[in-house]
Amino acid sequence: MGQLGFYINNQYCTGCKACVVACKDKNDLDTGVNFRRVYEHSEGDFVERDETVISNVQTFFASISCNHCENPACVQGCPTGAMHKREEDGVVVIDHDKCIGCKYCMWNCPYGAPQYNEKIGKMTKCNFCTDLIEAGESPACVGSCPMRALEYGPIEELRKKYGNTRDIKGFPDSSITKPNIVIGAHNYAK
């Protein structure tokens, strides 16, 4: 199968957060714990013309979860080896038998993907809905998007189809962890 990744189309995302809700529901997440998050970014200005103020402000949204990075900082920061990358598909997962809940993975991840679960005293995060994929379905976030702004698949196929953009304003520099995402940047994104 190769390394899995996400395509995030900022052009289509309306910020509805259906992906966030679907992920929370599928993973039975508590309040404040979100494996997938939607960020809003606005830029532009107001132009004054003939005593009239014209809005040139643009807002776009970016849905993000764990990026199952090529060089995951969470894995490097895990002292027990609980956080690891699966060989068959590159998905970064947590072995709860090894996790001690130290939060090093959370502190190391520039995307805030690992989340601490108070009830079990261990770290949790997006596992790419591998159970759904194995059953022939899409990850919950992808399947729930009414605008079809999210897509998943082998990252090389996504890059061939959509390009290799993985840096947009407001996100950490992709050279840090080499995230397995492709971003269809909004026309007004920098």
Image (tube, grey):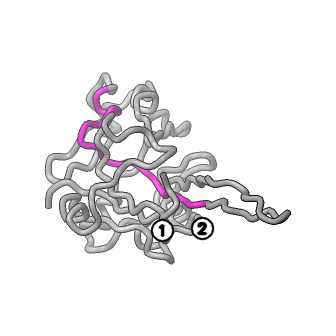
As for residue 72 lying within the magenta part, the answer is yes
The residue wearing badge 1 is: 11
As for residue 97 lying within the magenta part, the answer is no
Question: Disc 1 marks which amino acid?
Answer: Gln
The residue wearing badge 2 is: 16
Q: Secondary structure at mark 1?
A: loop
Residue 72 lies, in percent from the top left, at 30, 37
Question: 100 or 103: which is nearer to us?
Answer: 103
Split into 4 quadrants, where in the image is the N terminus? bottom left
> How many C-alpha atoms fall within 10 Å of the one at disc 1: few (<14), some, or many (≥20)?
some
Image quarter for residue 155? bottom left
Q: Secondary structure at mark 2?
A: loop
Q: Report the number of numbered marks.
A: 2
Residue 112 lies, in percent from the top left, at 47, 39
Image quarter for residue 60? bottom right
Residue that extends furthest to the right in the rendered view of this protein: 51
Residue 12 lies, in percent from the top left, at 49, 71
Q: Are marks 1 and 2 in contact (CB under 8 Å)?
A: no
Q: Which residues are magenta?
A: 59-76
Question: 47 or 18: which is nearer to us?
Answer: 47
> How many C-alpha atoms fall within 10 Å of the one at disc 2: few (<14), some, or many (≥20)?
some
Residue that extends furthest to the top in the rendered view of this protein: 79
Residue 128 lies, in percent from the top left, at 34, 56
Q: Residue at x 85, y 63 (%)?
A: 51
Left of 136 or right of it: where is 113? right
Q: Residue at x 49, y 46 (%)?
A: 169
